[in-house]
Amino acid sequence: MLTAYFDETGHSRDEKQKFNGMAGLLCKAEEWERFEDRWDRMLTKFKIPYIHMADSMTLFAGWPNAKIKKLSEAAWIAIKTIKPLPIGSIIPMDGFRPLERKLRHYLEDPYFISMQDCMKLVFGPALGFLDRDFRVAMVFSDQVEFRHDALAMFEAIRNMMPPELRDKIDPPDFRDMRRWGSLQAADMVAYETYKEYERVYCKLSRKERYGYGRMRDVCESQGVHPIPIRYHSTESLSDIIRRADYTTRIEEYWRKKKSNRK
């Protein structure tokens, strides 16, 4: 069993949001069990209940920078130890919004694009297991506003997959991220993915963040380069529309062909 833990980044319904996407970590299920024990020990050592980047100002209030740095180092060491694969997809909303009407004709939410990318990226390494009896599970943070959409998106994407892969992936599970270190690690990956794309896309002068560098280290230690994250652009989003339009025209052609034969 391979398990991928994911977290969304950004809010697709927030008009002020710069980027939206999804990112996380893929690893063997037995490695995740080992990871949870190590993560729990780390949290106990630093006397915090969980890690959530959106709550960092509260969780680490009053901490000196040196302590925050030590926690970050410990967290990334715990992640690297099980050799997971960071995967993700992120979309610039200033590229999405001008195409929104056409994109939403085919895709109701930008998260659909990111989930589709992530499911494809999951099966990249998983294809090496096709000669075995393997399965892939996807786990998300249990957020009420995302659960229904995620289930609908998953079913739509799975129906588009080849039959030999369609039955290899289980419907997504939803868990409380405050109780699962694996989801907290996915949250860190999603956060670093957002920040790195913001740095590159907006041409900011700041250096690459420590966390993103550790993501790259995790990948390179497994011979993977670059990090398998899909960074979308206006061009790639336009290409999605072109391919969807083409598919629709082909399907319409064959519908008319069959209708004329009757």
Image: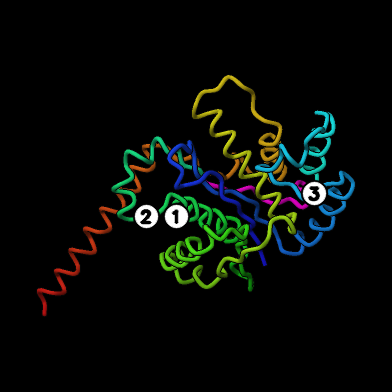
Q: Are marks 2 and 1 in contact (CB under 8 Å)?
A: yes
Considering only order in the chain, which callout, 1 or 3, is on the residue closer to the N terminus?
3
Q: Give the image location of residue 191, x and y in percent.
A: 62, 41
Check residue 85 for magenta coloring.
Answer: yes
Q: Which mark is residue 81?
A: 3
Residue extending farthest right:
45
Q: Is residue 180 above or below residue 17?
A: below
Amino acid tagged 3: Thr
Considering only order in the chain, which callout, 1 or 2, is on the residue closer to the N terminus?
2
Dot 2 falls on a residue whose secondary structure is: loop
199 left or right of 65 in image: left
> At 45% across and 62% down in the image, what residue appears?
153
Amino acid tagged 1: Phe
Q: Which mark is residue 107?
A: 2
Q: Based on the displayed image, in which of its 4 quarters is residue 226 positioned?
A: top right
201 left or right of 251 in image: right
Separation of residues labelled 3 and 1 (CA atoms): 31 Å
Q: Which residue is mark 1?
A: 112
> At 54% across and 34% down in the image, what residue appears?
197
Considering only order in the chain, which callout, 3 or 2, is on the residue closer to the N terminus?
3
Q: Is residue 23 above or below residue 258?
A: above
In the image, the segment drawn in magenta is 79-89
Check residue 156 for magenta coloring.
Answer: no
Separation of residues labelled 2 and 3 (CA atoms): 37 Å
Dot 3 falls on a residue whose secondary structure is: helix
Q: Residues within 10 Å of mark 3 (few under 14, many from 20)?
A: few
